[in-house]
Image (cartoon, grey):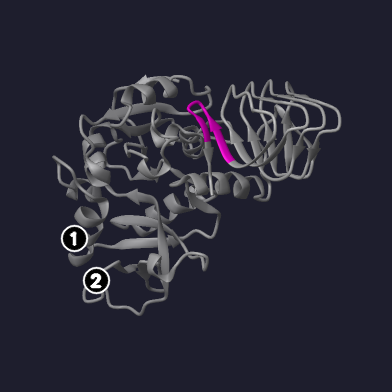
Amino acid sequence: MEIEDRPGASAMVLAAGLGSRLRPLTTDLPKPCVPFLNEPLLFRSLRVIGNLGCDQVVVNTAYQSNVMKSICETAPPEIPSVVLSVEESRLGTGGGVAHAARYFTKNEPILLVNGDVVSGMDLGLLLQTHRESKAWATLAVFRNRKFPDELHKVVSDDVGRVLSIADVDSTRKHKGDPAFKAIYTGTMVMSPEFIASLPSEGEACLKEDGFWPGLLKGKDIRAVEMPAYWSDIGTPKRYLETHKEWMLEPGFSPGEDYFPIEKHVFVHESAQVGVGVSFKGPALVGPNVVIGDHAQFEGMVCLGENCVVPARTTLDHVVCWNGIQVPEGHHEFSVFWEGGTLSVK
């Protein structure tokens, strides 16, 4: 992958967070570089953006910037070029966007995606809706009864115009009846005017320094409901759960080098699977993995490149990063990573 340093980007991935809740997995890695389904999570976001026709994407970085640069340089060729916007100190979501603005295509809307999210949202629809409405900003939102009502902070009318976000109410500016309450996904489209409204220097927040002042001034902020799968990989528990949930999504396929050996179980063509190995799925077995005879996969398992699973070992809700030699025995709800074994309860 090329690391660019020129204007022309039409999308941005927010990737400068510390990933504190995901530690120790983020001790030596920026959170968007943590492996998800055997590749850095960031690559998934870049690939989805690239499928929209974007050939250059800004990625901001502050924590472990050198690691971020090195990992971006290993990206496969189908992923768009990256412009790294390096922050000497973390600038927050709004400050990060303002700092990166010099790299954006001028006078064009910019797609913004959180770097720690896995989703099946139709970002093309989000962009189309934004262009048709000519809104100041357009937010991707979703509703889910599994999440508490207090997280459904975006209130919109029946045409998608945002009336309030959290505690800031714009109904005096935009008269309308609330039609639905939803959760902001961390994905949005920003107009050039929205970007220009953010503080040009120092730390800033998209919500407090962008959405809220805009609502109070009567700016047209729209919400587009996205019913697709969405997950924030914020904690080790959600990290494991998201692996399982995404592998069970309809139509999931890890790529042409994998073949299904049974429902929800995919094995790379270079992997070696011993005799008598049983899978309950979902499972993803990466390149050059070696699985010993009569090993048992009792629940979700994701094995990275060059992992070795001894004979008669049992795995249940386990993710292994590249190159892991799994100890013999029974292992459940665990992440095997470069620093050791993390038990996830």
Along the line of sight, the residue nearer the viewer: 133 or 257: 257
Q: For the residues marked 2 and 1, what is the alpha-carbon distance in whole angstroms?
A: 10 Å
Q: Secondary structure at mark 2?
A: loop
Residue for point 58% across, 40% down: 334
Confirm whether the magenta stretch covers residue 273. no
Q: What residue occupies the far right of the structure in this picture?
A: 276
x, y percent for residue 161: 35, 67
Q: Is residue 315 left or right of residue 197?
A: right
Residue 297 x %, y %: 73, 39
Magenta extent:
334-341
- Which residue is at the front of the view, 164 or 176? 164
Q: Residue furthest bottom?
A: 177
Q: Residue at x 69, y 20 (%)?
A: 288
- Decide: is 221 above or below 231: below
At label 1, counting other C-alpha atoms closer than 10 Å, the crowd grade (few under 14, some 14-19, many 20 or more) is some
Left or right: 34 as drawn, with respect to 267: left
Give coordinates of residue 44: x percent, y percent.
51, 36
Labels 2 and 1: the sequence-earlier one: 2
Query: On the image, numbered disc 1 is attached to which residue?
Result: 213
Element on which disc 1 rests: helix
Which quarter of the picture shows residue 313? top right
Please state which of residues 7 and 310 is positioned toward the viewer in this rendering: 310
Which numbered marker is on residue 170?
A: 2
Question: Label 1 amino acid?
Answer: Pro
- Is the stretch drawn in magenta largely helix, strand or loop? strand
- Give the residue drawn at x 81%, y 38%: 278
- Tag of residue 205: none
Q: Is residue 51 visible?
A: no
Who's the residue at 53% across and 26% down the image? 78
Amino acid type at circle 2 is: Ser
The picture places residue 205, in percent across and down from the top left corner, at 23, 50
Say whether residue 243 is visible: yes
